[in-house]
Image (cartoon, rainbow, N blue to C red):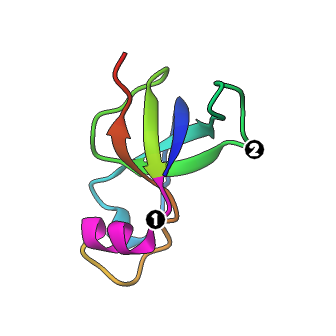
């Protein structure tokens, strides 16, 4: 699990069927001190996170497969929580 800041949203005109109904966010991974930790990446979200929110993301394959209800998906990162303000 990693802490990340939501910095944008993205869309796809053609996407894998497992992504139907999921929002795609551009997230910036953060260090424990709040600095950037690597390049931005795309994460799926169903929690209603918005730009400026700090979220908890995971790349745990089992959690992603269970959430998407499929064993065949290109998803790498998923939002699993939002940081309290």
Q: Nearer the viewer, residue 47 or 12?
A: 47
Of all residues, the one furthest to the bottom in this rendering is 71
At which x and y percent is residue 81? 33, 41
Residue at (75% x, 44% y) in the render = 38
Residue 60: say if magenta.
yes
The mark tally for this picture is 2
Magenta range: 58-68
Of all residues, the one furthest to the top in this rendering is 85
Which residue is under mark 1?
A: 15
Give the left or right position of residue 79, taking residue 26 as reference.
Answer: left
At which x and y percent is residue 85? 37, 15
Residue 65: say if magenta.
yes
Q: CA distance from mark 2 to mark 1?
A: 25 Å
Which residue is under mark 2?
A: 38
Do labels 2 and 1 touch, CB within 8 Å? no
Query: Mark 2 vs mark 1: which is more N-terminal?
Result: 1
Q: Nearer the viewer, mark 2 or mark 1?
A: 2
Residue at (48% x, 46% y) in the render = 11
Q: Nearer the viewer, residue 58 or 21?
A: 58
Q: Which mark is residue 53?
A: none
- Magenta part mainly helix, strand or loop? helix
Q: Few, some or many C-alpha atoms within 10 Å of disc 2 (few <14, some 14-19, many ≥20)?
A: few
């Amino acid at each position: 699990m990693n802490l990340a800041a939501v910095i944008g949203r993205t869309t796809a005109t053609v996407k894998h069927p497992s992504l139907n109904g999921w929002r795609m966010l551009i997230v910036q991974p953060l260090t424990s001190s709040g600095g950037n930790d690597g390049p931005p990446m795309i994460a799926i979200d169903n929690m209603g996170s918005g730009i400026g929110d700090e979220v908890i993301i995971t790349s745990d394959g089992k959690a992603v497969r269970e959430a998407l209800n499929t064993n065949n998906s290109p998803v790498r990162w998923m939002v699993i929580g939002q940081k309290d303000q």
